[in-house]
Image (spheres, helix red, strand yellow):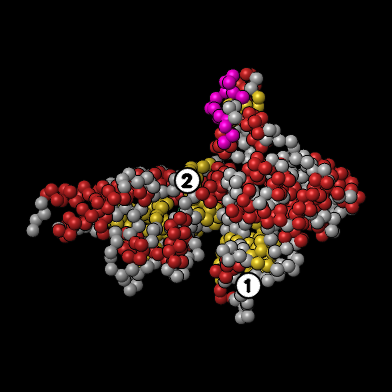
Amino acid sequence: MTVPHNVAVRVRALREQIERHNYNYYVLDRPAISDAEYDRLFRELEQLEARHPELVTPDSPTQRVGAAPVSEFEEVVHRTPMLSLNNAFDDDEVAAFDRRVGEALKAGDIEYAAEPKFDGLAVSLTYEDGVLGKGATRGDGYTGEEVTANLRTIRAIPLRLDRHPALLEVRGEVLMLKHEFEELNRQQRTRGEKEFANPRNAAAGSLRQLDPRITASRRLTFFAYGLGAAEGRLPAFKKHSEVLDYLEANRFPVARERRVVKGVDGMLAYYRSVGEKRERLPYDIDGVVYKVNELAGQEKLGFVARAPRFAIAHKFPAEEAASEVLAIDVQVGRTGALTPVARLRPVFVGGVTVTNATLHNEDEVHRKDIRVGDTVMVRRAGDVIPEVVRVVNENRPPHARRFVIPAKCPVCGSAVRRLEHEAVARCTAGLYCPAQRKQAVLHFASRRAMDIEGLGEKLVDQLVDHGMIETPADLYRLDPDALADLERMGDKSAANLLAAIGASKRPTLARLIYALGIRNVGESTARDLAEHFRGLERLMEADEKALVQVPDVGPVVAQSIAQFFGEPHNRRVVRELLQAGVRTAPMLSRAAAAAAVAEKTFVLTGTLPHMTRDEAKARIEARGGRVAGSISKKTDYLVAGTDPGAKYDKARALGVKTLDEAGLLKLLEQ
Ligand code: D41
């Protein structure tokens, strides 16, 4: 049966459209049609091909998935070997590389093509007459495994090229995007299957499946970084950067973060800028790669052993490293929460030496089954608190016991309780527990609370451990001589601290409420409570029924507050604070307070230290104020952050009052 001409034309058009949408979606990350429209095109193509099997070609988008499983992979000899990269671990090694290059090329200020170093699997794609014929893993660089059927399932890889030489090898890395990895592990968890340690392992495991249908079900992607063998007509490339542009023009994904830089300074600046972006990139990278950009220069430099002399990988400090759990301690926080902490054999990871890692809570420890003596992978990414990611099981000592959260507080010996719906266990002693007492004092003194400068952790430890303070109220009765005798103090520091404590005696009511550290009462709730009750006494006497009258206060918060003030000890602390001379700043009458903001026009400019402009706007508007975009004579206040710009000058010129963030907060708190 011959195929009608119009069917053949339609099939060709459908393939082109589908591949274009694949490209928009998987390479450009910019879909141009809906999933439903895409599915419709795809189904139409499938139906036409089913009716006219002679039209099916290997480069049809319908042929990406569905190849039969194999029992093992064939070996492939790479036409040109896939070399390895030498590594540089610090700036000096990069400088040494640049010096060697400069000497060999007898030139200075060398131009380099700089790229991210993808943490994936290197593969080679062979296009014969523009059609993807073979795909192979790197293997040992000379021979790899033929994984064509699996690579074909990766939508970011073109099955055919538009303009093409007779033969072309494209080299690049197969990887799994971070969010796809998270999603895959979520699925593995719900199915009760083993999770993957990282995106690289997930990509490797997915690519090396004997059944391509499994590979197809995993979302892999690909980035090209160069060419291997080529036969036939190709543009006359002079630079590596031109090769990358060529690949990009031929619909291969190529790193957007690539740059051409000059000399060591250019390379190091690139390294730092990519390092700074690393967390936000959708894929894992383990460094950057610099390649001499001039291809003539590359040729001149040649190779040593299996690595080119014209390229080097500049590695980031590893974010994961193995260490050993020496002990599991339990820390007690301000609200009594018990947090298990792993004490580790010191290990250099993420650029610093790590000795402790949080284990979050009891369930986490059990989920990961972390035990003393275990060898574990420790992760420290960016500025995030170090974590134990998983146990590396082989080395577990035979009698390692399961961790259990202690029944008694490790600091004060009081009972520990864990509520049914909560992940954390808590010490029930409240402020009788020295650990909680310390945290309570630190919170009381913190910047957003009573703002006592110079009262840090080391000092509070000493004050509590020497029995000099039991509650925040004791701060206002400290003896100057005893204070001066403490470690790392002295007369001058003692006097400064006492002055700072004295200066904290006039807080707003909202700050004082916040400073008390009532569970579930953050700054915003504290403000609402102050506004509603307008005095500490009234708040202390309020029952749960009265408390839920406050906007945004629900039964849980109301219960926390009522419980807090139901505790005689807490009432005593408040009484003592008042006796010590702590007085809340007078609040304006409701009418006056409203008048301070309501109906007033504000203009915001610059960056505020603690809130976004949207937050500031919302809070002004919540009080009936208006926020305008530009300054005029009608503006009542300009709220200026850092880098205020021209609005600030104009406000000054018009005599408009300016406020900083603190001034605005004061106005809002009134
Ligand atoms: O992103 C990468 N992982 C990457 C790997 C890259 N951007 N460029 C590379 N360039 C090369 C040379 C210069 C040898 C062609 C590489 C690799 N090689 C490579 N990948 C695995 C081993 C070597």
Q: Is residue 655 left or right of residue 176?
A: right
What SS does tag 1 mark?
loop
Considering only vertical position in the picture, is 648 above or below 156?
above
Please rate how many residues cluster around mark 2, counting C-alpha atoms within 10 Å: few if below 14, some from 14 to 19, many from 20: few
Q: Is residue 493 left or right of residue 171?
A: right
Considering only vertical position in the picture, is 472 above or below 66?
above
Work out whether residue 28 or residue 438 is closer to the camera in this orientation and state it.
Answer: 438
Q: Position of residue 518 (x, y in %)?
A: 68, 52
Residue 562 among magenta residues: no
Q: Quadrant of the C terminus?
A: top right
Given the current orientation, which residue lies at the most extreme left position? 1
Magenta span covers which residues?
622-636
Q: In the drawing, what numbered circle is on residue 403? A: 1
Quarter of the rendering containing residue 600: top right
Q: Position of residue 561 (x, y in %)?
A: 66, 52
At 28% from the left and 64% from the top, the residue drawn is: 66
What SS does tag 2 mark?
loop
At 70% from the left and 52% from the top, the residue drawn is: 517
Q: Which amino acid type is marked by label 1?
A: Phe
Q: Position of residue 413 (x, y in %)?
A: 74, 68
Question: Between disc 1 and disc 2, whose residue precedes?
Answer: 2
Quarter of the rendering containing residue 631: top right
Work out whether residue 218 or residue 441 is closer to the camera in this orientation and state it.
Answer: 441
Instruction: Report the mark closest to the observer, 1 or 2.
Output: 1
Q: In the drawing, what numbered circle is on residue 90? A: none
**Residue highlighted by disc 2:** 257
Residue 630 among magenta residues: yes
At 66% from the left and 51% from the top, the residue drawn is: 543
